[in-house]
Image (spheres, helix red, strand yellow):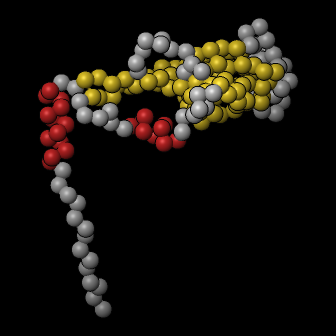
């Protein structure tokens, strides 16, 4: 199931280097699924043989055409830090008062399952699937990276100027 990412993990994964001799390649893909009365769950998973890091960032959940004015509760099933399965309701939508909810790029690691716990939908979830994988740097790229690090001069503190009176 999915792992709920800590804020520092999200920041490190998005822009941190991959260490000596490796680069970080990114791929971003649009994600979307629809939950209805007949299709009450959807599981997002990746190939187990894939050694890339996958992140599913949910941006929005909304009721779509044909929705009734009833409570539609969407639940995410994933894994916590102790690797135990956990189910968390992430949205309670009703056509007359809250048909759309921003999830502000709520990040999960697959596999993750979405359930329509109550209501008949249709409820649409959108976001992006981010893939990060490490690639070996060529010797030329590695030496360029080392040269860049050597070229940086230390920053010296600014001297204070005395004010004239």
In the displayed image of the protein, which residue is found farthest to the top?
Answer: 38
Query: Does residue 160 appear to the left or right of 120 in the view shown?
Result: left
Picture coordinates of residue 144 (x, y %)? Answer: 15, 35
Query: Which residue is depicted at the point 37% across and 23% down?
Result: 133
Image quadrant holding the N terminus, namely top right
Q: Taking 153 as reference, is 162 above or below it? A: below
Judge by depth and name the residue closer to the eye, 63 or 12: 12
- Residue sitting at 63 percent across and 33 percent down? 103
Q: Is residue 94 visible?
A: yes
Q: Which residue is drawn at 48% across and 42% down?
A: 8
Residue nearest the viewer, comparing 4 with 85:
85
The C terminus - image quarter = bottom left
Instruction: Give how far across and how far down residue 12 sits, in percent.
Output: 42, 39
Percent of width and height locating residue 129: 50, 22
Residue 70 x/y as whole percent: 86, 24
Looking at the rendering, which quadrant does residue 125 occupy? top right
Residue at 83% across / 26% down in the picture? 71
Q: Is residue 61 visible?
A: no
């Amino acid at each position: 199931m999915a792992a709920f990412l800590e804020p520092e993990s999200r920041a490190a994964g998005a822009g941190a280097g991959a260490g000596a001799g490796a680069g970080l390649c990114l791929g971003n893909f649009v994600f979307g699924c629809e939950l209805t009365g007949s299709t009450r769950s959807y599981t997002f998973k990746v190939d187990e043989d894939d050694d890339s890091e996958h992140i599913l960032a949910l941006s929005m959940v909304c009721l779509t055409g044909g929705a009734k004015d009833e409570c539609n509760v969407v639940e995410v099933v994933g894994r916590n830090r102790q690797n135990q399965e956990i189910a968390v309701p992430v949205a309670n939508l009703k056509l007359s008062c809250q048909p759309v909810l921003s999830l502000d790029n709520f990040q999960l690691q697959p596999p993750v399952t979405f359930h329509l716990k109550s209501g008949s939908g249709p409820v649409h979830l959108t976001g992006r699937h981010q893939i990060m994988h490490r690639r070996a740097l060529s010797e030329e790229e590695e030496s360029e990276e080392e040269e860049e690090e050597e070229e940086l001069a230390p920053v010296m503190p600014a001297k204070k100027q005395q004010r004239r009176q």
